[in-house]
Structures are given as structure tokens and as C-alpha cells.
Image (cartoon, rainbow, N blue to C red):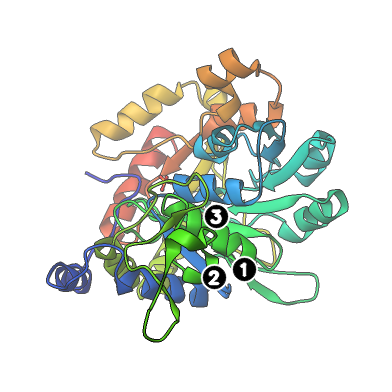
Amino acid sequence: MIPYGRQFIDEDDIQAVINVLKSDWLTQGPVIEQFERSLADYCGAKYAVAVSSGTAALHLSCLAAGIRHGDEAITSPITFVASANCVLYCGGSPVFADIDKNTYNIDHYEIKKKITPRTKAIIPVHFAGLPCDMEEIKNIASRHDLITIEDACHALGSEWMDSHRRLNKTGSCSYSDMTVFSFHPVKHITTGEGGAVLTNNSEYYKKVLLLRNHGITKDPEKYTNRDLAFSLNPESLILNPNSWYYEMQELGFNYRITDIQCALGLSQLKKLDLFIKRRRHITNIYNSAFANIEHVKLPVEPEGKKSSCHLYAMQIDFEELGKTRAAFINALKEKGIFTQVHYIPVHLQPFYTKRYGFKEKEYPVAERYYTKTISLPVYPGMTDEDLERVIYSVKGCLHAG
Ligand SMILES: *Cc1c(COP(=O)(O)O)cnc(C)c1O
């Protein structure tokens, strides 16, 4: 069986987890900070906060951005539902901007059309690992005083060149306020479940840190209720913080990640560049295998961008081919090859149509893209034989063998 994506775990990963299991701390111990530091360094950001999932990371970054009732945030309709749901969690309204027909990323011309006096943030999604045009998006955001949160759940390790010929790593937040990653097993590195918020802004950093743990602080310098927080030492006449004391200053959550998970994350991070190399190799092999086949359009990588190749989303004109997508996917499944569709446009989900009145044909590029898309297997542990088998079978289904 060949899945569309899966984790790669080796003996070092297993040993790292065992080491934590034998240590004093399973959660809220030292490994979380080590993982956060390594992640921030890898991406070139000042701060990272690791949390329990990519969705939690999106939620907390929206809260840190101050999104609340009456605010709008613009995102892509071709993404996982969490990119839009995070705005709803804060009481805000998600607004979609259609995608570019070549990159499948949010189209910045469409973003401009969707800006209103209520717009608070833009949440671009680096679809399949291809970085959005962040310089352009940051320009729009600056002109309208908006906060930019990159949903980079597909894009850990991706890079792009800006107009000053400077290389930017996704997560460096060089053209955004915050960047969000996921460490679900199908993503680039895994912690089982997990996610992170990266930023260069100390205020956002502190806010996300506070909200990750119920809005509770144990930092005596931040205590506001000083009568309860401190006791006078009768001998030295010094006020000492009470050892049991903590303060809940905001309504936060339990979005903590564990040391067990972060040990896995740290160990995985060491292999990230190798993982991406393999993903890019698989992508290149697919690109040459399916070049110039009728009814097929391959993913692009515009000049100056280096995708982390999370997905291989190819477009097949099933109508021209004379075969439904369901039949195509089932035929591959019978050969043990599991493909996926990324994504059903979020605005067409019943919750969005029924509760928020989104309709079909509102985002024509996204909807046309959706009818043709199919994601082929890509993961670091995919062997050359697996790859050959997928190519042979897909070509067979395309009558292009
Ligand atoms: C995976 C993913 C998420 C959610 O991450 P979880 O860790 O599964 O919560 C959000 N946005 C995108 C684009 C994703 O691919």
C-alpha cells in the first residue's frame, strides 16, 4: 500500500522519545524550549512557541493579532478548514480571496478586492509548500494596516528570493507578523500532533505563550495582585513571591505540547533538509514522467521560489479524459495507491454555506481547480520502486502508458 503521505521515523527518533520517558519531565520540561529554539533558528525567526496542533497555533495567532467580533480576515478557499475556522474561533468573519490559476496560492489582486474597513488580517496559505508572494501581500497589509499570519503548515523549509535578492526562509517572518506550522504526521516533520507560532515581535510572542497555558503567568514581575502574590520575610523585610502563587490574567487554553512530542520534533528537525530533498526529487521525477501528457497540468514552481513539496497536486481534466475522478481514484486504490484531493473549497463546506451564506461560483478559479485536482503520494520514505509503480499506474489510468 502506498499512502499519499506518511511520517518517517528512525531509531534516533525512537531513542529521543525514550530518553524523555526516562527523565523527570514528560511535559512542561526543558525539551519544549530546546525544540522552540531549534525551530526558530532553523527558520531565522526570533521566537517560536510550540503548541498542541497547527490549528491551536492558528487560533492563538489570531487571538494575538486581536481578531474579535466584527473583524474580518482574508484567506484562501483552497486550504484545510482550520485556516478559516481560526477566525471564527475568535468571533471574527473569514473572507475568502480566490486563488491564482497557476500557483493555486491566494491571488493578491483578489485580496485587494476583499479589503473593507473591517479587515483586520490576511492569512495566506503556502499551498503544497510553494511560498505565496509575501512581499506583495506585506505591501497590501502595510497600506491597509493589517496583520499578516502565514499559514505555513505545508511549507516548513521552503524558501524564496525577494526583490532585494535576499533569500527568505518561510517562518523567518521577514514579511509577516506571525507564521504557523503543523507537525501532523503527513507534514514535513512530526510530533504526532503539534504546531508552532513563529514571530519576531515580542508582544505577540508573550501573548501566545500566555494563552497556550490558560492565560496563567508564574512570573512575579507580571503579578498584579501583589497582596496575594507576595509575603514579607520578617527577618530581611523583603517581599518574596509566594511559591504556590500564579495569576490567570487572560482566558487562555490548554494548548500545551509535551516534552515527549518535542523530543521527537527535535530529532525530526535534524532530518528536515534530507526530507525536503527527497520530496523535491520525487516531485521532479513526477514532473518529467507526466510532461506533455494530454489532459494533464503539472504543478509549477515560479522562478525565485523553492517549494518544500508537501503535496504533488496535479490537474487532470477528467471531463476530457472521459472518466470521473472517483473512478480514477478507485482504480488507483485497487492497485494499492492512495491519492487524495486537496482541497474541497472551504466556502463550499455545509457549515460555511448554511451558516454564512457562501455560495457556489463565488470563487470560480478555486472551484474549477477543485474539479480537476488529485494529489499523488509524496513522502520521504517513498522508495524508487514505489515511485515507479505510481507513475506506471497513473499513466495507465491516463491511457498514456
Ligand atoms: C495541517 C494543516 C492545518 C492544521 O494543522 P493541525 O496540526 O492538523 O491542526 C492548518 N492549515 C493547513 C494548510 C494544514 O495543512
The residue that label 1 is drawn on is: 202
Q: Residue at x 29, y 60 (%)?
A: 258
The mark nearer the N terminus, 1 or 2, is 2
> Residue 260 is drawn in which quadrant?
bottom left
Report the Cα–Cα distance between label 1 and label 2.
8 Å
Count residues near mark 1 (Cα–Cα under 10 Å), then give few for <14, some for 14-19, many for 20+: few
> Residue 354 is drawn in which quadrant?
top right
> Residue 26 is drawn in which quadrant?
bottom left
Quadrant in the picture for the N terminus: top left
Residue 87 picture location, percent across and down = 60, 37
Q: In the displayed structure, would residue 95 be above or below residue 23?
A: above
The residue that label 3 is drawn on is: 152
Residue 387 picture location, percent across and down = 33, 54
Residue 345 picture location, percent across and down = 57, 29
Count residues near mark 3 (Cα–Cα under 10 Å), then give few for <14, some for 14-19, many for 20+: many
Q: Residue at x 34, y 49 (%)?
A: 5
Q: Amino acid at mark 2?
A: Tyr
Is 138 or 119 nearer to us in this picture? 119
Residue 328 picture location, percent across and down = 39, 28
Q: Amino acid at mark 1?
A: Ser
Label 3 residue SS = loop
Q: Which mark is residue 47?
A: 2
Label 2 residue SS = strand
Farthest residue to the top: give it: 354
Does the image show residue 317? no
